[in-house]
C-alpha cells in the first residue's frame, strides 16, 4: 500500500486512540513510528503497532501515562516515563534539556520506567538541530550474552550521537551493539524469511538462519568481545545510573506478557560554545568535507535523512499485511 506520511500518522494515531491511548501520546507514538518507517528502519516502524497495542490492552504499557521531570541537580534532569511509551519522555527531554545544557555547558537526562526507544537517531538529531552535541544510550530486554556466555544478559543496547555542522545537516550515528538490531530478526520472523548466519545464535550457542531460533537464543555482538563490553557500558549508563530495570530484569517488547519493561535511556547534551567557542560547527564542517573528499565515503546519517526527505514528498510503501494488521486493531 502506498500512503503519505500524514495519512500514515493519522491512521496509526487513530488506532492507538481507539485502544485507550491519550491523544497526545498517540500522536507522539504515531509520529515516531512513521518517521522510523520513512527512514527505512521498518523494524522500529509500523510493524511494532500490533505489539504496542497488545501491551496497552493488557496494561503492560500505560497509554495514558504522562512523563514528569525533576531537576535533580543543576546539570541533571530526571525523567519518569511512568510505565508509558518512551516517545513522550524523549520529547520532554528534547524540550527541557537544551536550556540546561546551555546554562551548565553540559546536561544529563536520566529516563526510567520507560519503553522501546525506537530509532534514536531521530532523537539526537533534534538536539543537533538546536546547536548541541548529543549522546544517547538505551538498554533493551536481554538478547545478548556476556562474551563467552550463552545466556542473554544485555540488550542490543544502542548508542546514538549527533553533532551540528555549519552549513550542512548534522552528522548522526545510530548503532545497536548487536550485529543488527533485534527488530530486524522480528521482521524476518513476521515475513517468514531466513536471516544471515552471522546475526544470531540459537539457544545452544550455534549460529542460526532461523529467526524463530534466533529469538529464543542470543544476538551476536558487533565486534565480538568489544561489542559485548560496550553493551555493559550502555547498561550502566542507561539503567544503572537512571534506576531503570537492567536488561535481564525487563520483560519483552514484542509481546503483551509480563509486567512493564521499565527500561532506561540516558541522554548527554553538550553546548559546544562552552568547550571550544563559536567556531566548533565550522571546524566540524571542515572535518565533514575531508571525509566527503574520499570516494565511497558516505557521511553518517545522510542515507536516513535522504529517505525521510523522499518519503515526505512521495509517501511510503507498506506491506499489505502490515496495513491489515493495523487497521484490524482500530
Image (spheres, grey):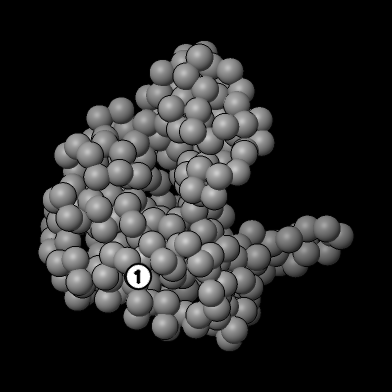
Left or right of residue 11, residue 289 in this image: right
Q: Which residue is mark 1?
A: 327
Q: Is residue 235 left or right of residue 89?
A: right
Nearer to me, 146 or 215: 215
Image point 33% across, 57% down: which residue? 50
**Residue drawn at point x = 78 percent, y = 64 percent:** 292
Residue sitting nearer the eye, 138 or 161: 138
Residue at image location 21% in from the left, 72% down from the top: 17
Quadrant housing residue 56: bottom left
Up the image or down, 35 lies above or below 176; here it is below
Q: Classify mark 1: residues with Cα within 10 Å, few (<14), some (14-19) or many (20+).
A: some
Relative to 1, say whether 138 is above or below: above
* Residue 232 picture quarter: top left
Residue 89, how many percent across, how many down? 25, 60
Task: Kindly tell me whether residue 125 is visible in this rendering.
Answer: no
Q: Is residue 298 something one can see in this rendering?
A: yes
Instruction: Judge left or right: residue 203 versus residue 167.
Output: left
Q: Residue 289, percent across and down? A: 75, 67
Residue in the image at 78% along x and 58% along y? 297
How far from the left and from the top, in percent, is residue 149? 47, 14
Amino acid at each position: 500500500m502506498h500512503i503519505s506520511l500524514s495519512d500514515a500518522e493519522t491512521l496509526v494515531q487513530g488506532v492507538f486512540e481507539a485502544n485507550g491511548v491519550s491523544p497526545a501520546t498517540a500522536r507522539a507514538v504515531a509520529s515516531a513510528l512513521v518517521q522510523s518507517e520513512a527512514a527505512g528502519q521498518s523494524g522500529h516502524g509500523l510493524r511494532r503497532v500490533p505489539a504496542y497495542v497488545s501491551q496497552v490492552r493488557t496494561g503492560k504499557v500505560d497509554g495514558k501515562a504522562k512523563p514528569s521531570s525533576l531537576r535533580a541537580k543543576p546539570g541533571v534532569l530526571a525523567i519518569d516515563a511512568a510505565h508509558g511509551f518512551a516517545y513522550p519522555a524523549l520529547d520532554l527531554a528534547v524540550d527541557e534539556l537544551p536550556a540546561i545544557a546551555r546554562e551548565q555547558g553540559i546536561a544529563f537526562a536520566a529516563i526510567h520506567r520507560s519503553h522501546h526507544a525506537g530509532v534514536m537517531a531521530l532523537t539526537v538529531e533534534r538536539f543537533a538541530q538546536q546547536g548541541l552535541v548529543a549522546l544517547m544510550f538505551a538498554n533493551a530486554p536481554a538478547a545478548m550474552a556476556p562474551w563467552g556466555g550463552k545466556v542473554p544478559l544485555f540488550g542490543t543496547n544502542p548508542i546514538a550521537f549527533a553533532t551540528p555542522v555549519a552549513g550542512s545537516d548534522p552528522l548522526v550515528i545510530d548503532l545497536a551493539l548487536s550485529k543488527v538490531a533485534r527488530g530486524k530478526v522480528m521482521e524476518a520472523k513476521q515475513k517468514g524469511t531466513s536471516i544471515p548466519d552471522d546475526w544470531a545464535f540459537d539457544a545452544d550457542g550455534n549460529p542460526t538462519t532461523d529467526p524463530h531460533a534466533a529469538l529464543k537464543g542470543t544476538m551476536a555482538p558487533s565486534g565480538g568481545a568489544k561489542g559485548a563490553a560496550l553493551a555493559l557500558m550502555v547498561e550502566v549508563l542507561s539503567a544503572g545510573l537512571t534506576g531503570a530495570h537492567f536488561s535481564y530484569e525487563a520483560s519483552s517488547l514484542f509481546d503483551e506478557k509480563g509486567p512493564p519493561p521499565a527500561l532506561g535511556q540516558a541522554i548527554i547534551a553538550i553546548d559546544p560554545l562552552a568547550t571550544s567557542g563559536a567556531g566548533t560547527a565550522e571546524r566540524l564542517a571542515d572535518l565533514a568535507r575531508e571525509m566527503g573528499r574520499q570516494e565511497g565515503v558516505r557521511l553518517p546519517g545522510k542515507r536516513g535523512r535522504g529517505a525521510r526527505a523522499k518519503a515526505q514528498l512521495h509517501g511510503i510503501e507498506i506491506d499489505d499485511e502490515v496495513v491489515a494488521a493495523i487497521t484490524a486493531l482500530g
